[in-house]
């Protein structure tokens, strides 16, 4: 592999930002920061762009939309995996955890057999991938049929993260029956009668859920697979999940729940779309409020990969966090949460997962992505012209 010298960059380190600095990468690793007179096979002048670690996305459902862009319209799975891989590279996400739901036959790709095929397709595509694609399996606790499927996938070594979720009406994301019905009708093209039957089925299937959750979490933990709970809505639920050995809390519903998670050592994961929109789509807490309160550990792209880089810069503009601290929400902290010691920071010896970010108007946009030292995405943003027709400097991100 060729060595590459990245020069004239604004380099984001874990504890500070180096202006007009440089990074040398070789053989897939970072070999020097601010090297003096370095020689390399290739030199790339970043012209003042921000150089930061590649993004680590612990939860993104985008693969489901690639496989099923419209309700009940399924594309070939190898095609879907190839397309989402390219999207991740363009979004600067060098370690994506593709989130796939196991909920019996809830809808389309959220079918246990189809979801299992997607998991195996992601793994089979790894030799061709632009980025380090990983799998996040989401277990719906009201489904007794997927337990054996998930155990088999874990035994195959194709699961990188397991979370448990309960989407039955009356708690978590769906605080009322009506909110559940509206979601299923709006998102999954169900009739009201179909949505009502789905709600009743979930409620009936809660018997035995605790034993199933305990069994799956124990199996994952025995195999060294990180585990998470989803949509935690009370301090009591946090305590229960912590006692079961869960290592992360995804999308805690309230500030008190997030505080409880952090206080007992559970990193929290919140949505980047929530940051950009300034609100939760389900009426839960605003992610920016959790960040300001110091109880947000990580951001994930949830359903839109392009939001992750934008949200990280928005946090730096809208809170007291430094740029290094804001970038940690999408790099270092997710790496630590999943035990990825070889990435998430710009440091000598670590994997050369890097992204360069150009400021184009008010938008931070990915211009280059390196995955293990290999340039997997590159584009050029022309200079911005002022209203008078003169070439001007890009604007900084507005608060």
Image (cartoon, helix red, strand yellow):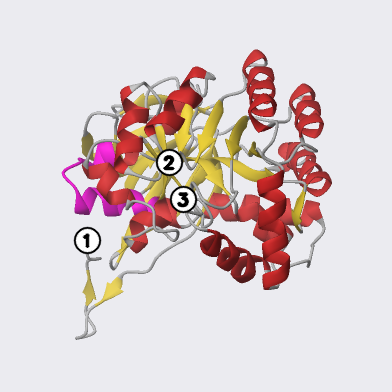
Residue at figure coordinates x 68%, y 64% from the top left: 195
* Type of secondary structure dominating the magenta stretch: helix
Mark 1, Cα crowd under 10 Å, few <14 / some 14-19 / many 20+, is few
The Cα–Cα distance between marks 2 and 1, rounded to whole angstroms, is 37 Å
Q: Is residue 361 visible?
A: yes
**196, 138: nearer the viewer:** 196
Q: Secondary structure at mark 3?
A: strand
Mark 3, Cα crowd under 10 Å, few <14 / some 14-19 / many 20+, is many
The reply to whether the C-beta atoms of the residues labelled 2 and 3 are less than 8 Å apart is no
- Above or below — where is 323 with respect to 364? above
Of badges 1 and 3, the one in the foreground is: 1
Residue 312 horizontal side relative to residue 251, left or right: left
Residue bearing the label numbered 1: 396
Q: Residue 97: where, in percent of width, then height?
A: 58, 39
**11, 399: nearer the viewer:** 399
Magenta residues (range) = 309-326
- Above or below — where is 42 with respect to 151? below
Q: Residue 204: where, in percent of width, then height?
A: 71, 45
Q: Secondary structure at mark 1?
A: loop
Of badges 2 and 1, the one in the foreground is: 2
Residue bearing the label numbered 3: 368
Q: Is residue 331 visible?
A: no
Residue 399 horizontal side relative to residue 125, left or right: left
Q: Which mark is residue 233?
A: 2
Extreme left residue here? 320
User: For residue 310, what is the image quadrant?
Assistant: bottom left
Residue 3 horizontal side relative to residue 395, left or right: right
**245, 65: nearer the viewer:** 245
């Amino acid at each position: 592999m060729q060595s590459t010298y990245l020069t004239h960059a604004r380099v984001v380190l874990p504890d500070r930002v180096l202006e007009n600095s440089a990074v040398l990468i070789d053989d897939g690793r970072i070999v020097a920061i601010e090297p003096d007179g370095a020689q390399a096979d290739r030199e790339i002048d970043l012209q003042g762009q921000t150089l930061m670690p590649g993004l680590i996305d612990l939860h993104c459902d985008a693969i489901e939309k690639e496989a099923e862009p419209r309700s009940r319209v399924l594309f070939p799975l190898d095609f879907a995996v190839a397309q989402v891989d390219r999207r991740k590279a363009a979004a600067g996400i060098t370690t994506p955890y593709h989130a796939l739901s196991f909920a019996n036959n809830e809808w389309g790709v959220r079918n246990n057999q189809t979801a299992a095929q997607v998991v195996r397709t992601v793994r089979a595509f790894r030799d061709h991938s632009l980025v380090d694609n990983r799998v996040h399996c989401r277990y719906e606790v009201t489904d007794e049929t997927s337990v054996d499927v998930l155990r088999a996938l874990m035994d195959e070594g194709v699961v990188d993260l397991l979370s448990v979720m309960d989407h039955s009406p009356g708690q978590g994301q769906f605080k009322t029956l009506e909110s559940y019905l509206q979601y299923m009708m709006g998102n999954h093209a169900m009739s009201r009668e179909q949505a009502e039957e789905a709600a009743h089925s979930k409620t009936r299937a809660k018997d035995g859920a605790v034993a199933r959750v305990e069994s799956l979490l124990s199996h994952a933990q025995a195999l060294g697979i990180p585990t998470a709970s989803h949509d935690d809505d009370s301090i009591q639920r946090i305590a229960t999940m912590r006692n079961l050995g869960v290592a992360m809390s995804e999308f805690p519903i309230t500030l008190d729940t997030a505080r409880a998670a952090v206080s007992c050592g559970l990193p929290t994961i919140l949505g980047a779309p929530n940051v950009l929109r300034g609100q939760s789509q389900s009426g839960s807490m605003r992610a920016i409020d959790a960040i300001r309160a110091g109880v947000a550990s990580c951001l994930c792209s949830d359903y839109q990969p392009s939001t992750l880089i934008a949200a990280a810069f928005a946090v730096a503009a809208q809170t007291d966090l430094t740029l290094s601290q804001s970038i940690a929400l999408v790099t270092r902290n997710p790496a630590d949460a999943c035990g990825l010691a070889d990435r998430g920071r710009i440091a000598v010896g670590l994997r050369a997962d890097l992204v360069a970010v150009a400021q184009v108007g008010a938008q931070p946009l990915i211009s280059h992505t390196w995955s293990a030292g290999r340039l997997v995405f590159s584009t050029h943003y022309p200079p911005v012209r002022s209203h008078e027709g003169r070439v001007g400097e890009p604007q900084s991100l507005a608060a």
